[in-house]
Image (cartoon, rainbow, N blue to C red):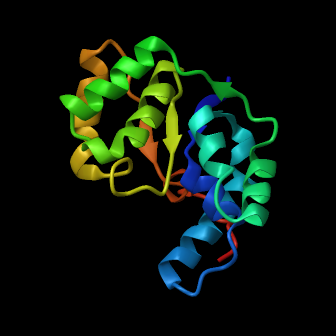
Amino acid sequence: MKSKLYIETSIVSYLVAQPSRDIVTAARQQITRDWWQIKRLEFDLYVSEFVVREAGVGNPEMATLRLAALQGIPEIALTEAAAHLAQVLVQKGPLPQKAALDALHIAVAVSGGVDYLLTWNFKHLANAAMKKDIERVCQVNGYEPCIICTPEELLEGETDVPR
């Protein structure tokens, strides 16, 4: 049985973006492409309405590419319980009000029973200082927290990844 993986919007954005001149961003773009080619088929992929909505805004050409990459990936619906968890993550948890959308990503992912939430968002999601508190809030509210990580973490051990 494959692990379930939630793709947060930053992943599809890095996947289809024009190569950046910034060395860190360019490396993340390449790592994302490597993960997409090498590892994605090892997982059952999921998104949410929030990912689709975010992917569809901005430059029309890039939005079309992002939405095409997400084509066929099932959506996890926002339930009332997940909306409540997102509220708790912001009101009583580690996320600031301005990260309400990030809280929704977490809440939809954990309520959908995913194993991994894949992201390049280090500010509020793949943030080591916040992970423990995010996990605690999820557990206190009856959810098994998912592992929030980057594509690089899920490529570990791959020796045939072109660099």
Is residue 157 placed above or below 101 in the rendered structure? below
Quadrant of the rendered image containing residue 143 = top left
Q: Is residue 140 left or right of residue 161?
A: left
Residue 35: percent from left, percent from top: 66, 56
User: Which of the 4 image quadrants contains residue 2?
Assistant: top right
Above or below, 97 against 55 in this view is above
Please state the horizontal and vertical placement of residue 55, each as a whole percent of the image: 65, 50
Q: Residue at x 26, y 34 (%)?
A: 90
Residue at x 60%, y 81% (from the top left corner)? 20
Q: Nearer the viewer, residue 48 or 146?
A: 48
Q: Is residue 35 above or below residue 71?
A: below
Horizontal and vertical percent position of residue 150? 49, 54
Q: At 21% across and 39% down in the image, what residue appears? A: 94
Which residue occupies the extreme bottom position in the image?
A: 21
Left or right relative to 125: residue 61: right
Residue 134 in the image: x percent, y percent? 28, 34
Q: Is 138 on the left or on the right of 38, as rendered?
A: left
Q: Quarter holding the N terminus? A: top right
The quarter in which the C terminus is drawn is bottom right
In the displayed structure image, the side of residue 26 where residue 75 appears, left or right: right
Q: Residue placed at 41% from the left, 42% from the top?
A: 102
